[in-house]
Image (cartoon, rainbow, N blue to C red):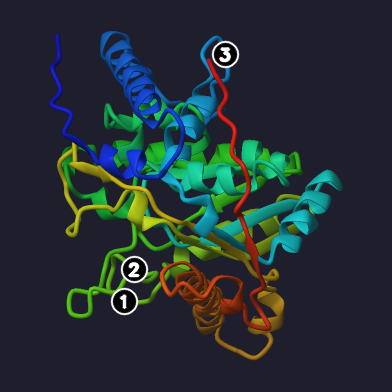
Amino acid sequence: MICYQVNVACNTFQVFSSGKPGADELVLSNMAVLFDRVLLDMEEPFEFPPYHKALREPFDYYIFGQNYIRPLIDFSNSYVGNISLFYEMEQKLQQGHNIVLISNHQSEADPAVIALLLESANTRIAENLIYVAGDRVLTDPLCKPFSMGRNLICVYSKKHMLDAPELIEMKRKANTRSLKEMALLLRGGSQIVWIAPSGGRDRPDPVTEEWHPVSFWGQAPFDASSVDNMRRLAEHSGAPGHIYPLALLCYDIMPPPRQVEKEIGERRVVSFSGVGLSVAPEISFSDIASAFENPEEAREAYTQALYDSVNEQYNVLKSAIHGKQGLQASIPSVSCHSQGISQTFVTF
């Protein structure tokens, strides 16, 4: 029998202080279901294929993830930027087009935050979004139940590729299989894929302590090769493809460790906070590349344009949520929409 030490710090006081009726019962119920799923997976470990479809029955892991993260979100202080573009994306998906979302990455709760902010108005995106997921959320015993409820393309992260030299070749072959699966999906059209080409979760600036979209690599904000791979997959799929920059602000509800950790089983601290999600109009590679003769310079410029848009949207969300400006934080390119709506829980 393999034993795991799962280190969790649940700030239940934050949920209790949210003012939600029955918050204490809700916390206990969610934790009971979580540990039941963790123990079940320890007895019969689930193996993720290169392309994993969310498990909805006999146990609905998607609803489980929604219900677990929902009470951590202060919806009265949460915002969606440019919500009309999500309706535009749904129309394109219905027409057989593919959508790629180039995003920053804030926490392990990102998929649930996206789905919770979109579930009432953009159900198709909330439930069908495919996430490019690193191997750690597929192997960490506490993460796995949440990952099982999402549609995933499973890859080995670049930043952990060299952790075990004897596994490098296996990881590369696995990533090749995952890319082939993604190519097949995109050929069928009507797919929407989320990827964070930053190499990991955002971290605070060590000097200012300010959070913002950053790169693990400490060089270009986004990895240009990752962006270019997604662009070429979308362009060669045979279906019309569109690439949109997307910004997420949700680190408060489940912040990552200050330093990147190699070991599985990081400590989790959760809290009650407002969150934000924003999307900007699609950015065309050809429009940017036309100004460059050097293909590499064009790829770098395109990646920078995507990052600049994500960063601009992120700053608007930060002003709306942490700066308490609310809807007044809107700027001409980012229009904030309040998420102060009633939230319902689904029972299993």
Work out whether residue 181 or residue 59 is closer to the camera in this orientation and state it.
59
Q: Which mark is residue 227?
A: none
Q: Secondary structure at mark 2?
A: loop
Q: Earlier in the sequence, mark 1 or mark 3?
A: 3
Horizontally, residue 177 falls left or right of residue 161, namely right
x, y percent for residue 112 = 49, 41
- Residue 203's image quarter? bottom left
Q: Is residue 204 above or below residue 173?
A: below
Q: Residue at x 52, y 78 (%)?
A: 312
Q: Amino acid at mark 2?
A: Ser
Horizontally, residue 30 falls left or right of residue 218, namely right
Q: Which mark is residue 57?
A: 3
Dot 3 surroundings within 10 Å: few (below 14), some, or many (20 or more)?
Answer: few
Q: Residue at x 27, y 8 (%)?
A: 43
| Residue marked by disc 1 | 219
**What distance separates the C-alpha of mark 1 from that of mark 3?**
43 Å
Q: Is residue 2 above or below residue 113?
A: above
Q: Residue at x 62, y 42 (%)?
A: 342
Asked whether residue 50 is in view, the answer is no
